[in-house]
Image: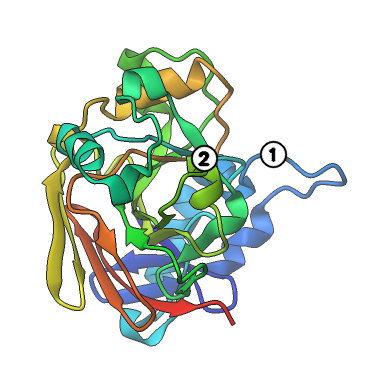
Amino acid sequence: MRICRFDDNRLGVVTGDGIHDVTQTLKELPTWTYPLPIFDPFIANLPKLRETLEQRSRQSNSKPVDGIRLLSPVASPGKIIAAPVNYKKHLEEVLAQKELHHGNLINEIHKAGLFLKATSSLIGAGETIELIHLDRRNDHEIELAVIIGKPARKVSAADALGHVAGYCIGLDITIRGPEERSFRKSPDSYTVLGPWLVTADELKDPSQLAFTITVNGEIRQDANTDDLVLGVPELIELASSFYTLHPGDVILTGTPQGVGPVLPGDVLLAKMDKIGEMRVNVGTRK
């Protein structure tokens, strides 16, 4: 199943003929009083809602994808976890270019570990990346995004995929500079998820996904997830060995070689096997 959020927080199921509005299903979610949960309520209850979503999608008329504004398919992640230099050629690229590392110590992922991005940086494909600090280089980074579906703590790689709700395309926009990664990668709109969530039952093997990103029609990054240093199971094992993963948590698996600058007015087209494509506009903070 492919699930999206669109327009004014509508919920949709994506099929070959368009998007079917199933927003009514959200009324079946439990309600909470303060303090609110630290997980995404919809993702946590997705297994219980699957049958209703499928039924309502069959009963509703479709609308074309081109006519709607796609939001992040995950509304309320508790954490956005990111994997640095998780492709060997990207590590070589960063080490070779001073404008990428700015004198920072760059370790391969086994030594560097993972880092967190602010959840306030999250937008969807139909929203605009709003660049700041235009005196610096702002780069695109395309990645496979993994959405956690049920709690995971000290999970082995062998069992890790059983904790996945689904997958999206992720864009990890980055300001180059000497500061810590999480600081430079967390401005508003610097994390893009989309175009929708593809549930894990439809994408059983995330280890063989080809993907590309173009900027104004020029191919910048062209790679495959089979080149990951740590694959999805190993990343979940590593992350869950340090903190509990909750439904809706996002893991950005790392970007390959070919990162490059983006400017206001640019149009990014990101494509990934078995997920789809998303076109994202770049602007500047007003």
Label number found at residue 282: none
Label 1 with label 2: CB-CB less than 8 Å:
no
Secondary structure of the residue carrying numbered label 2? loop
Q: What residue type is labelled 2?
A: Glu
Q: Which amino acid does label 1 sit on?
A: Ile
At x 38% / y 61%, what residue is drawn? 194
Q: Which image quarter is the C terminus in?
A: bottom right
Q: Can you identify the residue that label 1 sits on?
A: 38
Q: With respect to residue 155, does 214 lie above or below?
A: below
Q: With respect to residue 48, does 234 lie above or below?
A: above
Can you give x and y, in whole percent of width and height, for residue 163 in the image? Answer: 43, 28
- Front in this rendered view, residue 184 or 50: 184
- Front in this rendered view, residue 151 or 29: 151
Can you give x and y, in whole percent of width and height, for residue 35 in the image? Answer: 85, 42
Q: How many labels does the image show?
A: 2
Horizontal side of residue 153 vs 280, given as left or right:
right
At x 36% / y 35%, what residue is drawn? 84
Q: Can you identify the residue that label 2 sits on?
A: 180
- Front in this rendered view, residue 148 or 229: 229
- Gap between marks 1 and 2, in whole Å? 25 Å
Which tag is nearer the camera, tag 1 or tag 2? 2
| Crowd rating for badge 2 (residues with CA inside 10 Å; few <14, some 14–19, many 20+) | few
Secondary structure of the residue carrying numbered label 1? loop
At x 24% / y 54%, what residue is drawn? 259
Q: With respect to residue 170, does 247 lie above or below?
A: above
Horizontal side of residue 242 vs 39, given as left or right:
left
